[in-house]
Amino acid sequence: MVTELPKTDVVIVGSGWTGLAAAYELANAGQRCVVLERGGWRHSTTSFGAPEEHDELKYARQKEHMIDTPIKTLSFRNDGSQTALPMRRLGSFLPGKGLGGAGIHWNGQLWRPLPSDLNMASHYSERYGQGILDGLSVQDWGVDYDELEPHLNFFEKICGTAGIAGNVEGEAAEGGNPFEGRRSEPYPNPPMKSSPPQDIFRRTAEQMGYNPFHMPSANVTRAYENPYGAQLHPCVYCGFCERFGCGYLAKADPIICIYDVLKDHENFELRTGAHVLRVEKSADGQTATGVTYVDEDGRELFQPADTVCLNAYALWNVHLMLVSGLGTPYDPQSGEGTVGRNYSYQTMAAASVFFEKDVWSNPFMGAGAMGMTIDDFNGDNFDHADLGFVGGGYISANQTNGRPINYQPTPPDTPSWGREWKQAVRENYLHHIGIVVHGSSVSVPQNYLDLDPTYVDDYGQPLLRMTFDFPENDRRMSSYVLSKAEEIARNMDHVRAVSTSNQAAEGESYSVVPYQTTHNVGGAVIGTDPSTSVVNRFGQMWDHHNVFVFGACLFPQNLGYNPTGPLMGLAYWTLDHMKSDYLENPRPLMDA
């Protein structure tokens, strides 16, 4: 039996970056907000403190902060001819659980999109001709860079972002990224430090005619107070960012940056241990009436609400829409339907660089966004006319950690175990750096999300089914940009050996086993055409005007950057329009 609770103004599914931002903005606009979080309560100062948090086995290997696959998982296949099987353990991507979501174990690499990223279909077709997009389903976002810029800028202030701006009101700045879009203000804080290998990378890139700059970082570099009044502290370069929470309050996360200044608000309520089963609809199917969830005592509860905000992880937003009958599921055979359409990922490659003994990297001193980067081969920053692909990626010499279980660099042809391997680890640990190629991923009709016809979860609901393999476009792109990274690596001074890896190499199918990135995007994409998008340009569902969708599921394809900055820019854009144009007069904000 389902118990109906008192009605609230807004129910928000998920307490990560977008969920807490929505709660803060809407609660302060006078809306009573109930936030439902499947995981438990935790706090940066008490849950993530060293030395307990610096347990590599527990958090990096056993993935304590991530979802439990026996409770929440999906099935996977490479193409429609295969039978999908459940993902029994985490590998390729690591969605979070609990207050703060994946925002507590991210690296803090905080990017803006390039202006052309948001108009990918029209930009490439206008510059190169429509033929360059043959076989792809990429499309424009429906919102352009200048519209998002104030919201991107605001989120950078929320995080105390560190870096050197390359374009402030059209004025180029030395040491910044010359390819970035116009900024209204510089970064709030100065850039992170760089290590000797990163300085060698910078000098070599400059000598080769490229434009190196410090990676923009939410690992804060000095004491800082954000616009909400939250206090952040300078990074100590401990090397425990990705897969770990930050007890030093130095890595911006949703708990410190938003929750702490929201938790006592009269219009805010957080309920943890709340597993949302479905969004309920009105009798005529035109609007949502609230959500049904199971609490930690196993009770099934219905939370009525005037407005429903879907702020779960990208994959789970799509799953919730499919099991709730929100929108029309995508059919890859006919090409009709939108929910589950345009799923894409990230395309990762790397060059591993081993230096002579007089170049010290000291990898135990690192941070999640400690990187020296070039953007010369990202987006459309280079000529694609004769390359046979669109998109690109940044190339970055990163020094994120030197943790002993995961970080054991050895030169090519080293045995994988035994005495020689141990000797190689000992000789190279302090003299190595990785150069990452962080590449884009286009959408194609054969990559999509739907409901599995065979497997169900503990609640009897079909699993989300992922059908994905690297598009040929992405394989060519990754190979090309990796060749540029390898060229830089081999031109660097004091280098003894270089090896490369490419997870999208020709002939290699995508696998959910090795970690790549937690950058799953698409499936509920934004746009201006209801035949190709799930939500309109304001993040509002075409079919149900009181349902607003947040997160990377909105991306029509993935850009060459980490998605947190763009998805939060979209979040604040949507919240601005909810507050200024929807709440007082609920209705569709665009005609279908």
Image (spheres, grey):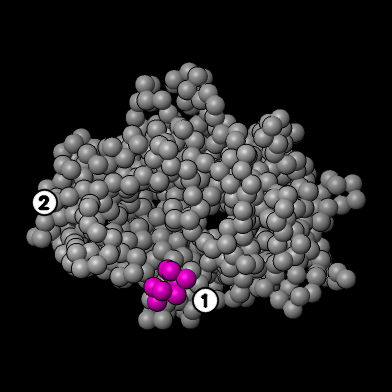
Q: Main secondary structure of the magenta part?
A: helix
Compared to 116, does 228 lie above or below?
A: below
Label 2's element? loop
Work out whether 504 lies above or below 88.
Answer: above
Is 546 contained in the magenta span? no
Circle 2 crowding by C-alpha within 10 Å: few under 14, some 14–19, many from 20: some
Question: In which quadrant of the rendered view does residue 264 lie?
Answer: bottom right
At which x and y percent is residue 200?
Answer: 16, 50
Q: Is residue 371 visible?
A: yes
Q: Residue at 73% across / 73% down in the picture?
A: 295
**Which is nearer the N-term, disc 2 or disc 1?**
1
Q: Which residue sits at x=55%, y=36%?
A: 443
Q: Is residue 56 magenta?
A: yes
Where does label 2 land, which residue?
494
The quadrant of the picture occupied by the C terminus is top right
Q: Is residue 306 visible?
A: no
Label 1 sits on what residue type? His
Q: CA distance from mark 2 to mark 1?
A: 44 Å
Q: Kindly identify which residue carries mark 1.
A: 43
Q: Nearer the viewer, residue 403 or 262?
A: 403
Q: Which residues are magenta?
A: 55-62
Q: Residue furthest right?
A: 283
Q: Which mark is residue 24?
A: none
- Give percent across and percent down for residue 9: 76, 61
Residue shown at the point (28%, 46%) measured from the top left? 500
Observer-nearest of 236 and 238: 238
Residue 59: give x, y in percent of width and height. Answer: 45, 72
